[in-house]
Amino acid sequence: MMATALLVAGCGGRTGSGAEEGAAPSAPVTADFGDLTGVCGPGTPTSSPTQGVTAKEIEVGVFTDMGFTKNPELVDAAKVFTSWCNDNGGINGRTLKYSVRDAKLLEVRQRMLEACREDFALVAGSAALDGLGVKDRLSCTLPEFPAQVSQVENTGSDLQVGSGASSARPYDSYTGMRQWLFKEAYPASAGAVGIIVADSPVVKSMADRYQESLPAEGATVIYNDLYPAAGVSDWTPYAQSIKAKGVKGLIFLGDFRSLAKLEDVLTSMDYKLDWVDATSNAYNPAFLELAATALTAQNNFTDLSGTAPLESAGSVPAVQRAKDLFARYAPDGKLTFLGLRALTQWLLFAKSASACGDNLTRTCLLEAARKETAWTAGGLQAPADMSTQTVAPRCFNIMKATPQGWVAADFAPDTGPYRCDMKAYVYTKDYGRPLTLADVGKSMSDVE
C-alpha cells in the first residue's frame, strides 16, 4: 500500500488563505490569466447560501498525501492561487480559503469526513488511494475539481469535473502517442512492444487495459513483467529478459527512479530500445539527472495529455504567468507538472464560482463548470469538454528527455503545441467503473 504512493505524483502542504504565510507584495497583480480576464474580483456578497460559503468567505479543501510523500507541490499551488485571487478581491468579494486534507496515504476516509463537515468543494488536490473516499464524498454531495485522479472508483465519478476526470474512461487516452511511436516514428517497433509494471493496484489496472488496447491499435506485446513496487536491488535480470525477447518499444509503469536504474543496465549491456514510454511520472528534472548516462542511448518519451509543457513559457503566455505567480507568492516553492495541472483546476473552479454571483451553491458551481465545452485554463491546456464524463479525448503532446532537458518531440502538432487528431481506443472489457450518486442513494436533486 505504501509503495503505491511512490507511483502516483505526491502532494502536500499547509493551511491558509491569500493573506497567510508570508504576505505578497502590496501592489496586486492583474486578475487576468492568459486569455482569461478578470478571474477574480471584488463584490458585495450578502448571503450564506450553503456549507462553506458565507458573505465573507469560501472554504474549500485540498487533498494531499504530504504527510507520507513530504511533497508540497499541490499546497504550494493552493497558496499561490488563493493569494493571487484574494489580492484581486476574491470570488465576487468573498475571500477564498483552503484547508489541507492530508490523507498521509492511508487516512483518505478520515480527511473526507472532515471535508464533508466543513468544505464547499474539493479543489486541485490528489490522493493515491482516492477511491477510499468516494462513497463519503458522494454521500455528502461534495463537488470535486481534482488535480489528479488515481483509482477506478474515483476516475470520472459523479460531482467531479476536469483534470482528465471527464475523459479518462472508457477510452485509452494514450492512443495518440502510442500510434505515433509505433506507426510513425518507429514503425519497426510495432511487432516488439514490452510492458513492465510495478506490483501495485493502481498501475497494474492500467497494464490490464493496455493488454487489450495495444493489439487493437496495431502493436504486438511480446514481453510483460512485474517488479516489486518498492524497487529492486539489481535490474540485470529484467534487462536480460528485455534483450532476449528483442523488445524494441517499452512501456514502463512505475517509479521513475526504477526506470532510470533499468535504463542504466540496458545501456551498459549495449542494448538500445527504439523508444521508452516513461509516462508523466518521469517528467521532472530528477529523472533527467538519474538517467543522465542513459539519455544519449535511450529515447524516453512522455505524453502530457494536452497540458502545456513547463518548458513552453516562451511561447505559451499562460505558462509564463504561472511561473511569475509562483515567483511572487511562493518564491521558495517550485512549479511542477502536477502543480500546473492544479492551477488549471483552480482556474476552472474560480471562473465557475464567479459566474454564480451572490447565490453560490454547489449546483450552480457544477452547472457553470459544465458549460465549458472548450476549456483551456487561459492557455495551460488543449481545449477540453467539461460538459460530460464520457467525451473522447482528442489532443495530446509528447515530450522527449535529452541530456539538455525535456524538449518537444517531433510529433507533428496541429493545434499550437498539441496534436488533436487522436481517435482514442474504446475499451470493450469491464475494468470496473466510477461511483455515482445512485450508488449511495442520492441524485442531483440532493445537491444544494
Image (spheres, rainbow, N blue to C red):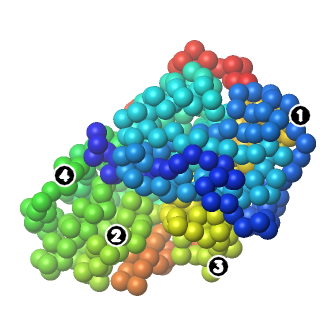
- On residue 315, the disc is 3
Looking at the rendered structure, the secondary structure element under dot 1 is loop
Whichever of labels 1 and 2 marks the residue nearer the N terminus, that label is: 1
- On residue 46, the disc is 1
Foreground mark, 1 or 3? 1
Residues packed near mark 3 inside 10 Å, few (<14), some (14 to 19) or many (20 plus): few
Mark 4 residue type: Tyr
Out of 175 and 146, give the one closest to the viewer.
Answer: 146
- Residue 431 in view: no
Looking at the rendered structure, the secondary structure element under dot 4 is strand
Residues packed near mark 1 inside 10 Å, few (<14), some (14 to 19) or many (20 plus): few
Marks 4 and 3 sit apart, C-alpha to C-alpha, by 40 Å
Whichever of labels 4 and 2 marks the residue nearer the N terminus, that label is: 4
Whichever of labels 4 and 1 marks the residue nearer the N terminus, that label is: 1
- Name the image quarter holding residue 418: bottom right
- On residue 227, the disc is 4
Q: In this view, does 257 lie above or below 253?
A: below
Out of 131 and 80, give the one closest to the viewer.
Answer: 80
Residue 53 lies left or right of residue 99; in this view the side is: right
Q: In this view, does 171 lie above or below 77?
A: above
- Name the image quarter holding residue 239: bottom left
